[in-house]
């Protein structure tokens, strides 16, 4: 999208958009003549995450919060930290939670030949639209199957460079592989991607139905947790 379109989407000035480009909050997708084209996904991510109030969470805290609302007990933080997270969760709304956990990963996009997507899928834990290719997951989110022309998934920060090099992935803001890079050790305690994580990632989709489904699922999980914990 153009600078003007990004400014309109974010209800911001062109000067603010240029500032966000400069600090890396928004990404350049390319150029059309002398005009800058902005990565639409980065605009959606920033729009979702700017609702955060108060002090930002680090990645370990973000993953702990998602684990907690799913009913888990994150072992990578101590009891005091868990208590503090729970107290803050009780006064947050779903939009604030989605913004707060935006620090959970580093998102990069790469391009691969379409025929290479099935082979690449073996290296990633599916999330977002790719997680919806599991019919059971798709049914929980009230959606049909996800897109097969895009691969979206998680990989740890140690293996990420090896996978990128091994698959000859080319970094591209409009690429067909969305990689969520996380520090190994605290992202997932069990098999599969938790629904709360898939929900947050769907909320950054450019597809309006996927965004709505992600928002609805996060609200459902968060509301159930609050009702069970006096929130």
Image (tube, grey):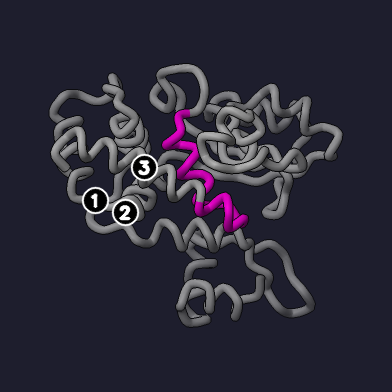
Measure how far apart labels 3 and 1 are at the Cα level.
Answer: 14 Å
Q: Position of residue 197 (x, y in %)?
A: 45, 36
Residue at x 63%, y 67% (from the top left corner)? 38
The quadrant in which the C terminus is found is top left
Residue under pointer 3: 220
Residue at x 44%, y 50% (from the top left corner)? 215
**Of pointers 2 and 3, the one earlier in the residue sequence:** 2
Q: Secondary structure at mark 1?
A: loop
Q: Position of residue 130 (x, y in %)?
A: 64, 36
Do the numbered discs 1 and 2 sit on residues whose CB atoms are within 8 Å? Answer: yes
In screen coordinates, is 192 left or right of 89?
right
Task: Tell me the mark number nearer the camera, choosing from 2 and 3.
Answer: 3
Q: Is residue 103 above or below residue 83?
A: below
Do the numbered discs 3 and 1 sit on residues whose CB atoms are within 8 Å? Answer: no
Magenta stretch, residue numbers: 194-212
Measure how far apart labels 1 and 2 are at the Cα level.
Answer: 6 Å
Residue under pointer 1: 92
Which picture quadrant has residue 74?
top left
Q: Secondary structure at mark 3?
A: helix
Task: Tell me the mark number nearer the camera, choosing from 3 and 1.
Answer: 3
Return the residue nearer the eye: 88 or 230: 230
Q: Position of residue 191 (x, y in %)?
A: 49, 17
Residue under pointer 2: 96
Q: Is residue 131 above or below residue 12?
A: above
Is any atom of residue 179 visible in this view? yes
Q: Is residue 209 part of the magenta span, yes or no?
A: yes
Which picture quadrant has residue 43?
bottom right
């Amino acid at each position: 999208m153009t600078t003007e379109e990004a400014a309109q989407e974010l209800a911001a000035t062109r000067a603010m958009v240029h500032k966000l480009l400069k600090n890396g909050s928004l990404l350049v997708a390319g150029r059309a003549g002398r005009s800058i084209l902005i990565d639409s996904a980065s605009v959606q991510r920033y729009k979702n995450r700017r609702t955060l109030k108060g002090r930002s969470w680090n990645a370990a805290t973000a993953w702990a919060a998602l684990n907690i609302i799913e009913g888990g007990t994150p072992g990578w933080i101590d009891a005091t930290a868990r208590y503090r997270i729970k107290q803050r969760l009780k006064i947050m709304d779903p939009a604030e939670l989605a913004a707060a956990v935006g620090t959970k990963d580093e998102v990069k996009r790469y391009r691969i030949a379409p025929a290479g997507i099935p082979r690449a899928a073996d290296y990633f834990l599916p999330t977002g639209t790719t997680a919806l290719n599991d019919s059971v997951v798709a049914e929980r989110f009230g959606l049909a199957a996800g897109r097969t022309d895009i691969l979206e998934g998680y990989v740890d920060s140690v293996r990420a460079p090896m996978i990128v090099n091994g698959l000859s992935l080319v970094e591209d803001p409009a690429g067909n592989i969305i990689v969520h890079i996380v520090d190994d050790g605290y992202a997932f305690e069990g098999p599969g991607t938790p629904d709360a994580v898939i929900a947050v990632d769907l909320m950054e989709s450019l597809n309006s139905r996927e965004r709505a489904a992600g928002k609805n699922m996060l609200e459902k999980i968060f509301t159930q947790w609050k009702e069970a914990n006096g929130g």
